[in-house]
Image (spheres, helix red, strand yellow):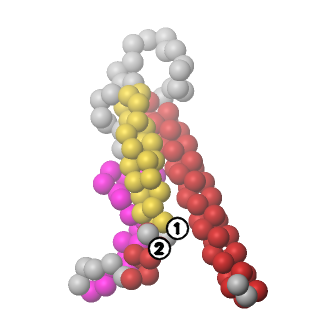
Amino acid sequence: MTRANEKWGQEILINRYLALYIRQFIKHALEEAIKQELTKFLGYEQYQRGNGKRDNNRNGYYERDLLTRFGLIEDIQVARDRNGEFESKVLPRYRRREEKIENLKDGQGRWTASLMRTAA
């Protein structure tokens, strides 16, 4: 293997690890932001006891995947409430792709080749 090939191979590995790190960071940031949104919506911190009766409570999580320019972020935990009234502004209902990716369709509704390479 030549030096150029070794350097090129190292750059590919660095880019893959960097993209993986960025996806993990985005996933963590989204999950924390959604938890904070739910806390504000409900009006109390997680595990906090209330003085009176509550009309609504936390009800675990559901998982969502999000396609970004850094690749697919899998299994994002989206917090939910028991009454189903909470809707995140950070990750709205039915959002499966980052807005910038949404604009990468060609005129006939097909995904561009560059997007398909990124998501793979």
Which residue sits at x=31%, y=84%? 106
> In terms of secondary structure, where does tag 1 sit?
loop
Mark 1, other Cα within 10 Å: few <14 / some 14–19 / many ≥20: some
> In terms of secondary structure, where does tag 2 sit?
helix
Which residue sits at x=51%, y=45%? 31
Q: Quadrant of residue 2?
A: bottom right
For mark 2, what is the residue?
Answer: 118
Report x, y in % for residue 22. 60, 61
The answer to which of 55 and 34 lies nearer the viewer is 34
Q: Which secondary structure type mostly characterizes the magenta part of the structure?
A: loop
User: Which residue type carries mark 1?
Assistant: Phe
Q: Does residue 59 appear anywhere in the picture?
A: yes
Q: Quadrant of residue 117?
A: bottom left
Image check: 92 left or right of 38? left
Determine whether 35 is above or below 104 in the image: above
**In terms of sequence position, does the residue under pointer 1 or pointer 2 come before the other?**
1
Mark 2, other Cα within 10 Å: few <14 / some 14–19 / many ≥20: few
Dividing the image into 4 quarters, which one contains the N terminus?
bottom right
Verify whether residue 92 appears in magenta: yes
For mark 1, what is the residue?
Answer: 70
Report x, y in % for residue 119. 44, 69
Which residue sits at x=31%, y=36%? 85
Is the residue under label 2 in contact with that under label 1 (CB below 8 Å)? yes
Which residue sits at x=33%, y=28%? 82
